[in-house]
Amino acid sequence: MISGFRAMEWAGSSDGRPLLRLIDQRKLPARVEYVECRTSSEVAEAIRNMVVRGAPAIGAAAAFGLVLGAMEAAAEAGTGGSLEAIREGFEARCRTMAGTRPTAVNLFWAIERMRSRFEALLPLGAQAMVDGLESEARAIADEDVSVNRRIGEIGAAVVRDGDGILTHCNTGSLATVGYGTALGVIRAAREQGKQIRVYASETRPFLQGARLTAWELLQDGIPVTLITDSMAADAMKRGLVQIVVVGADRIAANGDVVNKIGTYAAAVLARVHRIPFYVAAPLSTIDLKVARGADVPIEERPASEVTHIFGVPVAPEGVEVLNPAFDVTPAELVTGIITERGIARPPYHLSLPALFRDGP
Ligand code: MRU
């Protein structure tokens, strides 16, 4: 918890059974409402329909969802049920979770981590397996907050006193378990006493910048100015922006950055205006198995997100629409990638693998 709210809470319900409580990010900032997920399929649905979003938050939510999934699989197999039956039930839940959103690699990273823990624990019996998975999910959530704090500490060094910082989408306490990645850098710079101003681009069509980032920063008392995405070039030309810091959903081995649609545009503009462009992300967002950004599956979302705003049509009925949720920023436009193990610099095909080789 950073801003007086918890976006995600693993809690017990009145009947003593665990549940995952998620702030409903679709309703913010108009209403602060929570969705309570009592089954793994309810967690999967919450990820799919954007109740919870942001790469690290999706990963942590999926981990808790798989704790529920493991309990369901054990209950279905019944007392004395075979380990193979429990495994089949658990694997089915892993597949459902993996089918929710295709782009952010943190989802698959968290599922793999839970799956390998499951395999290690299953021979000890159903109860030990469920207890162990619960500890693992809690560890994923706790580590996310400490990793973000570290990213913030490291990244704050590239932010200078007086900087105007452009950020895109939402990378804060809502998009993570707490503190945030790019917003973590901003929070840390502020905690160090730097006088900064954030320019938050609204992030059409889902409006994560307007609805979520502006809301978080206002709560923290960090100076923020909301701009539409199309105002970024003008803001740079006017000298309002000295640095761009964004998050990522997946970073390929060559340093290409897959992030919210509009990130590529911001990177191109930063290059033209000679403004440094930084990406802040945990190691769990770096996917060395993927060679280039072009190999990452990009989620295409419903046309209605573009043709309607809060249910009100803003385009003629029947018009063809493109709605890719993410784009690829080529590595050559990225000044540095801020991680919990330091800032990777070009050439990324060398600096990114080195982050994984270095000790903790
Ligand atoms: O579609 P979303 O809202 O899940 O996309 C979120 C982003 O693109 C974020 O920038 C990214 O996940 C990093 S969040 C720390």
Image (tube, rainbow, N blue to C red):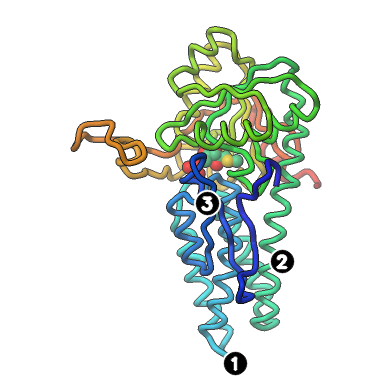
Q: Which quadrant would residue 320 be assigned to in this image?
A: top left
Give the image location of residue 187, x and y in percent: 71, 32
Residue 231 percent location from the top left of the image: 46, 17
Q: Mark 1 — residue? A: 80
User: Viewer-nearest of labels 1 and 2?
Assistant: 2
Q: In this view, does 103 lie to the left or right of 358?
A: left
Quadrant assignment, res 251: top right
Confirm or deny contact between disc 2 and disc 3 (CB under 8 A): no
Please name the residue that numbered disc 2 is placed on.
135
Q: Where is residue 276 in the image (x, y as percent from the top left)?
A: 63, 19
In the displayed structure, would residue 256 be above or below residue 285? above
Q: Which of marks 1 and 3 is nearer the N terminus?
A: 3
Q: Distance between the residues labelled 2 and 3?
A: 27 Å
Q: Estimate the spatial distance between the alpha carbons at disc 1 and disc 3, rounded to whole Å.
A: 41 Å
Residue drawn at x 50%, y 17% is 269
In the rendered image, which residue does mark 3 sit on? 33
Q: Which quadrant of the structure image shows residue 217?
A: top right
- The image shows residue 194, relative to residue 178, as above or below, that is above
- The residue sitting at the left extreme is 318
Indicate the secondary structure of the residue bearing disc 3. loop
Secondary element under disc 1, as helix, strand or loop, is: loop
Q: Can residue 208 be seen in this view?
A: yes
**What residue appears at the point 60 percent right and 48 percent down from the top-left corner?**
56
Query: Tag 2: Cα neighbours inside 10 Å, few (<14), some, or many (≥20)?
Result: some
Q: In this rendering, is residue 79 above or below 232?
A: below
Q: Earlier in the sequence, mark 1 or mark 2?
A: 1
